[in-house]
Amino acid sequence: MIVIDKAIYGQLLVKFQPKVIENEKEYDNARHILLELMKQKDRIPEETALLKLIATLIKEFDAKQDKPEQATPHEVLLHLMEENQVKQIDLVGKIGSKGVVSEIVHGKRSISKSQAKALGEFFHVSPAVFI
């Protein structure tokens, strides 16, 4: 068990003043401190404790960042059609008539559950991506 000297650790906390990261500037500052601590070869236990704290704060900030928006069912369909070189005519009879397929492909009609199931089977993906 590593013993932390509270006085030394307190001095480090005063010097670096770690806190919850709320913006990119604070993120950059925390990252700079982390890198400096990581470079030290003979790190004392108190510096290791501070390093772990800052790493945790950085990880928490990273986890909260905006996740990419999920593609719409229409976008998924267009992507799969392009990747698999599927034309509208190839979907006629599988998800509906020529007119229905055209409306779906052009985003004028949403994909029903039964159509999602058929598209899932056709493209070998989960039907959930179309709902």
Image: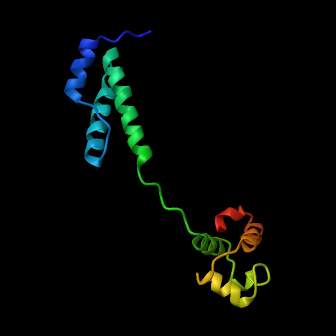
Q: In the rendered image, which quarter is residue 63 located in? A: top left
Q: From where the camera sits, is residue 40 visible?
A: yes
Q: Return the residue nearer the eye: 123 or 95.
A: 95
Residue 96 location in percent, x, y? 76, 83
Residue 41 location in percent, x, y? 33, 20
Left or right side of 93 for 85? left
**Looking at the image, residue 64 lies above or below residue 12:** below
- Tell me the residue at 45%/9% (across/down): 1
Residue 111 location in percent, x, y? 67, 75
Q: Return the residue nearer the eye: 82 or 91.
A: 91
Residue farthest right in this picture: 93
Q: Return the residue nearer the eye: 39 or 86.
A: 86
Left or right side of 69 for 61? left
- Tell me the residue at 31%/45% (across/down): 22
**Type of colouring:** rainbow
- Tell me the residue at 73%/74% (across/down): 115
